Amino acid sequence: FARDPATQVIQKVFPCDVIARVLPARTGPRLEAGLKQRVQALNPFLEDVYGRKRILRQGVVPAEAVLSSPLYLREVDGMPSPRGVRCHIAGVDLVRDHKGDFLVLEDNLRTPSGVSYVLANRAVMKRVLPDLFSGYAVRPVESYCHQLLRNLRWLAPEGVSDPTVVLLTPGIHNSAYYEHLYLAKEMGIELVEGTDLVVDQDQVFMRTTRGLRRVHVIYRRVDDEWLDPIFGRQDSLVGVPGLVNAYRAGGVTIANGLGTGVADDKAVYALIPKIIRYYLDEDPILPNVHT
């Protein structure tokens, strides 16, 4: 550890294990199918519980398990989601049991974090062990940021052909700030804090040296309650006043959408197999950890 005297930020050494955890190609298709299935079920679940609530009215999932969750945001109940998607980025944690089988430990749908370490680790490995990648067909990961930016641009409000995308960070003291900076640089978008944005007539603008610039999509790394002091925590210094109203009015798209945390609530986690069967009429490919 080392403290930077200029910023008082503690700099940490990035640990990198040069002995790679190898996953054979045959495990990939099942893992990929299982993760896709999970997200494909959680998105209609979110759309439903903030809409018609069919799964609750039919008793498939206990209503109290959802509506009593502190992560369920009644303020966004009934709000349509841009393009019908509320969870745009998912961070699903996997573990292996004593038999070596993969299980899902938890779903992270609010502000999932950690992908930058995958990308940075791969870059280090390629420099340290170049022969490993020239001698074997290692599946690449470098396209992640390009695909993420494409998806974020796709979320722009209707009629916007060249959207402005920004990454909203709480600031340098956040534990994941390295990732915020890394992803913004790799995608070629602006890294902004709450004070860099202003809302006017349900549209969001970014302060620049050339004046205000319209923002169409916000990849937010700020939790719901801190996102807008009018909407959530009034003492928030990292949010943007009026942002939620702009989101409601369709003036800006926020990824992930507000209220997605109810789908990664620990009580809801135990119900995911039922949710998959209800919306997809399929058995779960990847099981939960027994709880």
Image (cartoon, rainbow, N blue to C red):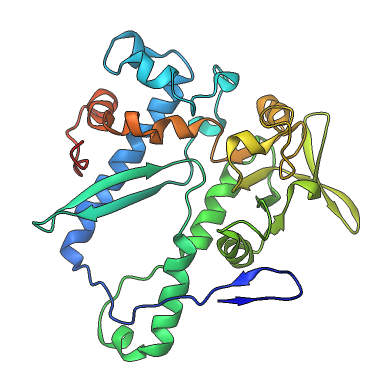
* Above-or-below relation of 75 to 208: above
Q: Left or right? Give the position of 64 relative to 278.
A: right
* Above-or-below relation of 1 to 272: below
* Above-or-below relation of 212 to 50: below
The residue depicted at 17 percent of the width and 33 percent of the height is 283
Q: Residue at the far top: name it.
A: 57
Which quarter of the image is occupied by the N terminus? bottom right
Res 283 seen here? yes
The residue depicted at 29 percent of the width and 18 percent of the height is 61
Q: Left or right? Give the position of 210 relative to 67.
A: right
Query: Residue 66 is drawn in which quadrant?
Result: top left
* Above-or-below relation of 268 to 191: above
Residue 219 place in picture, x, y as percent: 60, 48
The residue depicted at 31 percent of the width and 16 percent of the height is 62
The residue depicted at 37 percent of the width and 33 percent of the height is 42
Query: Residue 132 is drawn in which quadrant?
Result: bottom left
Residue 109 place in picture, x, y as percent: 45, 41
Residue 135 place in picture, x, y as percent: 26, 87
Q: Residue at the far right: name it.
A: 210
Q: Which of 34 and 288 is in front in this view?
A: 288
Q: Which of 233 and 113 is in front in this view?
A: 233
In the rendered picture of this protein, how many numbered marks are placed on residues? 0
Query: Residue 128 is drawn in which quadrant?
Result: bottom left
Residue 78 place in picture, x, y as percent: 55, 16
Res 85 seen here? no
